[in-house]
Image (spheres, rainbow, N blue to C red):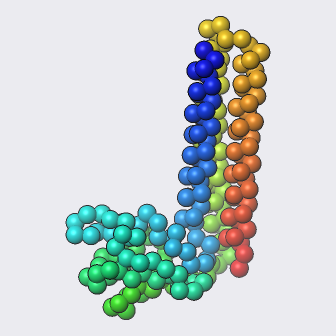
Amino acid sequence: MSEMIEVLIAQSKEQMDHAIDHLKKELTKIRTGKASTSMLDGLLVDYYGNETPLQQVANIGVADARTITIQPWEKDMLSKIEHSIFAANLGITPMNDGEIIRIAIPPLTEERRRDLAKQAKAVGEETKVSLRHVRHKILDAIKKEVKDGYPEDIAKKKEAYIDKILHDHSDVIDKMIVAKEKDIMTV
């Protein structure tokens, strides 16, 4: 019995770690007014009938603090890349000069900064909800084991340990959200 609970605890910790990793990826998608190639992560381009990640059909770089450059390996990909950027509705407009695509990142208004900060908070809260869901599942499993004869004092220690893991992960989320909000609100 004890071994099963240890395995469940390890799995729960792993799920919480995955939730933190997912949050990191989601936060990189929220733009801060600075050019970042991560804004284009997950963007798919029609490459000869196949949906292909942009990174596999072009070089992506940052020319300066407000400009992203995309240089496709094949010139006939320029219009398809442009179309994908428009379709992704990222709030940015690509400029095609026949050789390279430049994306100028417009400065954010104060209102837009506040909206993005709220969006970052919401993503953080969703992550916390998923952590609490993981915690709830493991606590239910521990209670079930107690009904089947698992010692209550050990179960209480395991529950306290799970609560500590949840608290530690929640602290990490809070720090990530504060850092992202600061980044967003910095002009």
Judge left or right: residue 152 versus residue 45: right
Query: Outermost residue toward the front?
Result: 3
- Picture coordinates of residue 29, whole percent (x, y): 54, 65
Q: Residue at x 64, y 78 (%)?
A: 109
Count all numbered tags in the image, as a single digit: 0
- Picture coordinates of residue 94, whole percent (x, y): 43, 82
Q: Residue at x 71, y 38 (%)?
A: 165
Q: Is residue 140 above or below residue 41?
A: above
Residue 8 lies in what quarter of the image? top right
Q: Residue at x 62, y 72 (%)?
A: 32
Q: Residue at x 69, y 51 (%)?
A: 173
Judge left or right: residue 114 versus residue 49: right
Residue 13 lies in what quarter of the image? top right
Point out the image quarter for the C terminus. Answer: bottom right
Point out the image quarter for the N terminus. Answer: top right
Query: Outermost residue toward the bottom?
Result: 97
Q: Is residue 123 above or below residue 44?
A: above
- Picture coordinates of residue 102, whole percent (x, y): 45, 86
Instruction: Report if residue 126 is visible in the image.
Output: no
Instruction: Report if residue 149 is visible in the image.
Output: yes
Query: Outermost residue toward the top?
Result: 149
